[in-house]
Amino acid sequence: MTIDEAKKILLAANLSPTERNALYVLLEEIGYGDLPDEIWRDVVGYEGYYKVSNFGRVKSFHKGKSKILKFGVSPFGYLRVVLCKDFKKKNRPIHILVAQAFIPNPDNKRQINHIDGDKTNNHVSNLEWATPAENIHHAFAMGLRKSGYEHFRAKFTPEQVREIRRDCVPGDPERGFKPLAKKFNVTPRIISDAYYCKSYQNVD
């Protein structure tokens, strides 16, 4: 078996992000070098200090030695590495480093979308620049974000929403927003939004 064949087998293994990163570091330590079809480019803003690959690996070049960096996980589930320049350390999300190095952004979009919905898959083929609206739309389409009564902050069940829309009479002292807000222990604005379908659009 050749080295490249061994790399492909290891790369195809069903590993967690932490296990995969440990594998990447091990490959570097035992001299396996680059992965098949791996391309390296300078990290934007850290030219000469760090490079990032189309596979989402990051390599440092401090003191003339190259080293694959271990990554951490942000509170939002994104993989990140610590970069240092001029004695200042910064946590940088890996998907941003890959996109800046490999993906053109002629429309100056501000966010990056993980196409398969996996925040740990930072291969260049899984990333695309997106507007905030495009990112949110994709998250809903992939089932990564919930709206209405499925959202973890939802105040009402579908039955309660239907009750509000059926029984509420705006301005009425007994059936208006304020008395219903008191009944459900929420603000009148929340009742108003549910009544006018500004929220809970997925309840018919």
Image (spheres, rainbow, N blue to C red):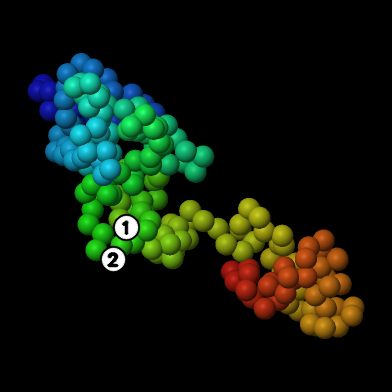
Q: Which residue lies furthest to the top in this view?
A: 30
Residue 184 seen from this side: yes
Q: Mark 2 vs mark 1: give the one in front.
A: 2
Crowdedness near tag 1: few (<14), some (14–19) or many (≥20) residues, C-alpha within 10 Å: many
30 left or right of 82 in image: left
Q: Mark 1 points at which residue?
A: 129
Spatial CA span between label 2 and label 1: 9 Å
- Where is residue 112 shown, x and y percent of the image? 36, 54
Residue 17 seen from this side: no
- Where is residue 48 shown, x and y percent of the image? 20, 34
Q: Which of 89 and 107 is in front in this view?
A: 89
Crowdedness near tag 2: few (<14), some (14–19) or many (≥20) residues, C-alpha within 10 Å: few
The residue at 48%/56% (across/down) is: 143
Q: Which residue lies furthest to the front in this view?
A: 86
Residue 67 versus residue 82 in the image, above or below: above
* Residue 107 - label: 2
Which callout, 2 or 1, points at the residue further toward the start of the chain? 2
- Where is residue 194 shown, x and y percent of the image? 69, 72
Q: Is mark 1 on a helix, strand or loop?
A: strand
- What residue type is disc 1 on? Trp
The residue at 28%/65% (across/down) is: 107
**Picture quadrant of residue 24:** top left
* Residue 29 - label: none
Q: What quarter of the picture does the C terminus occupy? A: bottom right
**Picture quadrant of residue 151:** bottom right
**Picture quadrant of residue 182:** bottom right
Please say if the residues under marks 2 and 1 sit with CB atoms less than 8 Å apart. Answer: yes
Q: Is mark 2 on a helix, strand or loop?
A: loop
- What residue type is disc 2 on? Asp
Q: Which of 9 and 91 is in front in this view?
A: 91
